[in-house]
Image: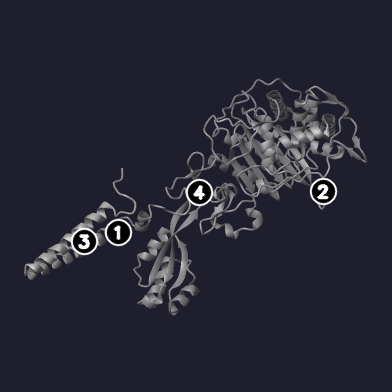
Amino acid sequence: MSLTHPGLPAPGWRWIKERLWSLERAFEKARTSGRAENDARIRIFVVLALFVASFVYLAVGATRLALFPGFDVASVARGGSGPGRAPLVDRRGALLAADLPFYTLYLDPRDVWDRAETRAGLLRALPDLSVSRLDRALAGSRRTFLAGPLSPRERDRVHDLGLPGVVFEQEPRRVYPLGGAGAHLIGFSDTGGEGLAGAEGALNDRIRAGAGDRQPTPLSIDMRVQAALDDELNAAATRLQAKGAVGLITNVQTGEILAMSSWPTFDPNHAGEFAPDQLRNQAVASVYEMGSTFKVFTLAVGLDTHQITPETLFHTTKGMAIGSRVIRDLHAVDHDMTATDIFLKSSNIGASQIALQVGGSTMTRYFQAFGLFHAAPIELTGSARPILPREWNPNTVASASFGHAISVSPVALAAGVGSVLNGGRYLPLTLQPMRPGARPEGRRVISEETSRLMLGLMRRNVLEGSGRRANAAGLRVGGKTGSAEKVIDGRYVRDKVLASFAGVFPTDGALSDDRYLVLILIDEPVADAESGGRTGGLTAAPAAGKVIDRVAPFLGVSRRFEQVAAQPVPATAELAALQER
């Protein structure tokens, strides 16, 4: 308990004050008694004592700085406020961003003894130093900036030269040790310590508040998972000469983002050197017509409203006329299809019939609940609003059933599909890590029974349907492919395709078990010998399968090989047709 009172001096200062007054009384007493020599001795003693105390203080400070060159006395006086931003770490504590001390080099020509020696020494210690700038500084008459920021090692090389007139100023600089890994999600800050993009911008206030005690700010991502996603997305996009690409991995039970990639990427250590398009996080800030991945929603709505069962039969042998428009399948079949067949063979005709049977008002109500009618709620800034039809007439309802006429962001699609796979709860995606076993309540969108049926359908689609190339041995992968012709100048362009795959693993186990969504988008892929085409089943699905194969051990998903009933092997033409979706 403090013994001081507001407005009164602290006990230490009171003691010093009393000692000074006692000395002054001693002086007065010496003068009164006529012993002036005692008065002089006392004053000389006091002056010597002050000199000794000052010398000891300076000696201790100099020794401390010599032994601990990074020690900042001023920061101690401020209570250890430290750099301007707290470190960023992933969910396991791996360092993503930190403030490190760097130095700015100045030259004061008025203090330089030998200009030739100074010039030669600086160019030897800093080979990248601008010669013209150095020469101007040496010829000038005032203190001039030479270089910076310099690392501590570069600073030491210059310091060891012992050159008069060379001055350093220390300043913190934000450093991203992993370079371009997870760059769009991590983001970057400016030289003034303000976050500008990614988590650095979204969590700016919290990161700055944590700088005082240097408590790191954790993110939900796992850098092992992030590195695998970055690597496979870069490999696929480069090989397929894509315009762009997006990858996402989430825990559908919590909404946590475990990895997020946008390709091409950039280095946040040098963000200013990259074009705005490279800095754009396409996972959050761009919207696309997602194609047949929307059939996940269409089938889920049909099953949840009990308008269909997996065995409900639909007439799909002929094109479906709506007004002056006829909806056709890319590869027509000569028989009717069940709802299961419609999903596995990605029939646009069948999906349109399901949506119209459910009804436009019900379909739009579910789309709203899946989070498809608003910008995705996420901490990252710039979450893009969807592009919606002006009117939900039968034509647009039918088109939306297979992913046309509506454009959404990848994070919006991931959150919506996640709610189909986690037991039926819509959960916003988040960068905040949660405790193990956490199960946010969310809002109910579909029933648990519908969720179980959809997990089964997505597993069958990887075993028998358009998602075969996403299968990863023993990991019980499910998913749905998508291939959408892009709209350019108001028209669908046949040779400009957005290829996608929304995958999930493992599909077995209890509904409450941890389960992971992997979303891959390839923007305008070019077919090569390995892919054999440009569609989602031929480009995005294989990339997703490779990602799943690599990240499963990090996520604790063990391989378990199922006893799968033998399925008839499709003819080559039928297999090609399946993979074209």
Distance from the alpha carbon under mark 1 to that under mark 3? 20 Å
Please name the residue that numbered disc 3 is placed on.
Answer: 53
User: Is residue 229 shown above or below 339?
Assistant: below
Residue at horizontal 23%, vertical 63%?
Answer: 54
Please name the residue that numbered disc 1 is placed on.
Answer: 66
Question: Callout 4, which amino acid?
Answer: Ile
Question: Callout 1, which amino acid?
Answer: Ala
Residue 486: percent from the left, percent from the top?
78, 47
Disc ID at residue 493: 2
Q: Are marks 1 and 3 in contact (CB under 8 Å)?
A: no
Please name the residue that numbered disc 4 is placed on.
Answer: 207
Distance from the alpha carbon under mark 4 to that under mark 2? 45 Å
Residue 391: percent from the left, percent from the top?
84, 42
Q: Are marks 1 and 4 in contact (CB under 8 Å)?
A: no
Q: Are marks 2 and 1 in contact (CB under 8 Å)?
A: no
Mark 3 residue crowding within 10 angstroms, few (<14) / some (14–19) / many (20+): few
Q: Nearer the viewer, residue 342 or 307?
A: 307
Distance from the alpha carbon under mark 2 to that under mark 1? 69 Å
Give SS at disc 1.
Answer: helix
